[in-house]
Amino acid sequence: MSSVVSSFREGAVQSPSSHRDFPEEAWVNYESFLTRDPSPVSQQTAWDSPGQAAYDFRSDYVTSPNVAMLASIINTSLLDDVMKEDPTTNSFQELIARLTGHEDSLLVMSGTMGNQVALRTALLAPPYSILADSRSHIIGMEAGGPATLCGALLQGVTPSNGHHLTLADVKKHVTLREDVYDCPTRIISLENTLSGTIMPLEDVRAICTWARSQNPPIHMHLDGARLWEAVAAGAGSLKDYATCFDSAQLCFTKGLGAPIGSIVIGNKAFMKRARWMRKLLGGGIRAAGIVCAPARVAVEQIFLGGRLCANQETAKRLSKLWVSLGGKLQHPTETNMIWLDLEAAEIDKEHFADLAERAGIKTMRGRLQGRIIIHYQICDRALEALANLFADVLKGKREYRLE
């Protein structure tokens, strides 16, 4: 074992996947996980193993539902949520509303659906615009939903501090006039976490307080797909953040490991209209317990069970290792995301991903190359392989220099 990896392991907390849900002997073979012949379906879908997720750093939505999540489906109710008759769904929505300090919540199939349902619910009559961080998912990662589904103008704002939007940023770019030439800002949408970084609660409160003081008040929406991570980092509670907003979306697959599902929160009047919007988008769910049962396990076991903290500690140790070897970061490592600056290190991005595959691990390709995400099913051998990769590419970066 190299001295770099030995040094990395000295400060290690327990591996995110070293727990009773997935015994180590059930993991896939490390050396051949990317190169072996396709496994039988029974092995690919084994309930007692994270499978390839144990070696996958591309995102925290690549996790496999664990045994408890899958077993919960067997015992769930199977009634109709469109008719509000499913007790599993109703009790789960009540739990999320209680945790976030809101009156009600509504199950949806994905974070994208959740954001679009919330935005369409809040926007009543055009013209209207939505102000958001220029890097946010609703601008660049949701297939143009606000324009296509809402007919809304998107106002992308680049944070002046390079980290998160502030009230000064909002005031500088918001459209308050209602002149015939203008498209007034009717929604301010914030994302937390964004690129793994945390928007401080103080700045969230400042923007939300100001928005509500306007005439008419500006609707505040939170894309909180990974809000769990900000809470796990100690930035504030779910209720602290969520009660600042008129609506919010939380995701159960990112970080928590549920197989499917997100949720929209707000007051009862907002949820009544949101149900129409969900139906319009084809999101009405019949046997909704199949979605809610494992999602509840994910919330209770992974989030409330404190399992996200180990991921963040691991991410910070890996980030520290990268920097100690001479690497630079695109963004600070505040939660479970590491943003490697491969260009600054003069490392070809595709070649980095190729080297990762040869080492038996998966890293992101395309527009998000350089992003490493730690989730609770990553195993020790994958972490060692990534640490060795860091050392190899930074010590020998001249071999991989960009032309």
Image (cartoon, rainbow, N blue to C red):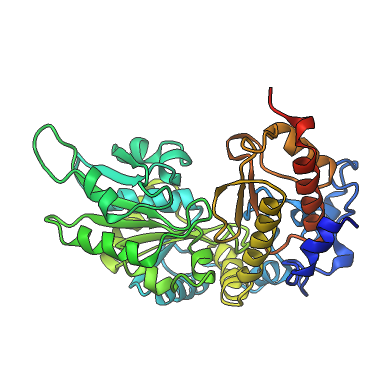
Q: Identify the residue at image location x=26%, y=52%.
A: 168
Residue farthest top in this picture: 403
Label total for image: 0
Q: Is residue 178 visible?
A: yes
In the rendering, at what x and y percent does residue 265 appear?
38, 64
Q: Position of residue 242 (x, y in %)?
A: 37, 67
The structure residue drawn at horizontal position 38% and vertical position 73%, both measured from the top left corner, is 240
Report the side of 315 relative to 143 (left or right).
right
Residue 374 shows up from this direction: no
At x 46% / y 37%, what residue is drawn?
Answer: 143
Q: Is residue 218 left or right of residue 359?
A: left
Is residue 281 rendered to the left or right of residue 226?
A: left
- Quarter location, residue 275: bottom left
- Where, quadrant-wise, is the N terminus in this rendering? bottom right
Residue lying at 65% horizontally and 68% vertically, measured from the top left: 73
**Residue 55: x, y in percent?**
77, 53
In this picture, residue 8 sits left or right of residue 154? right
- Name the image quarter holding residue 210: bottom left
Residue 385 at x, y percent in the picture: 82, 52
